[in-house]
Image: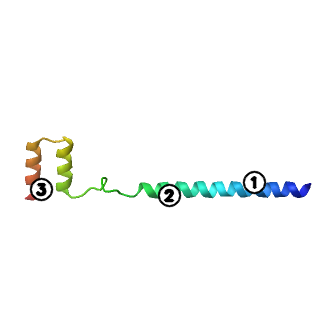
Amino acid sequence: MMMFGFLGLLLLGGILVALVIGGGGAFLLKQVGNGTVTGSERKGTAREMLDRRLARGEISRDEYEKIRGQIES
């Protein structure tokens, strides 16, 4: 009877260790994944950023031309 109690505790301990290791690994992978930069998130050059701002409607065409002239000079 005592042997089954020991085996049960050993099994429970193994399950807890597996959950902790698995959960920690998943957390670390999520953190590492947050540091990656996809194509849409990359900053790019000043001209590319300016083009995106115009495309999103954040600046007018006049503002775009003025800033582009400053960038290219």
- Kind of residue at badge 1: Leu
> Which is more foreground, mark 3 or mark 2?
2
Residue 73, by quadrant, is: bottom left
Residue that label 2 marks: 29
Residue that label 1 marks: 12
Expressed as whole percent of the image width and height from the top left, the position of residue 68 reads: 10, 52
- Kind of residue at badge 2: Leu
Question: What's the distance in space between the residues labelled 3 and 1, CA to CA?
Answer: 64 Å
Disc 3: CA contacts within 10 A as few (<14), some (14-19) or many (>=20): few
Question: What's the distance in space between the residues labelled 3 and 2, CA to CA?
Answer: 39 Å
User: Quadrant where the N terminus lies?
Assistant: bottom right
Question: What's the distance in space between the residues labelled 1 and 2, CA to CA?
Answer: 26 Å
Q: For the point 8% across and 48% down, which residue is it?
A: 65
Residue 46, by quadrant, is: bottom left
Expressed as whole percent of the image width and height from the top left, the position of residue 69 reads: 7, 53
Q: For the point 10% across and 43% down, which residue is it?
A: 61
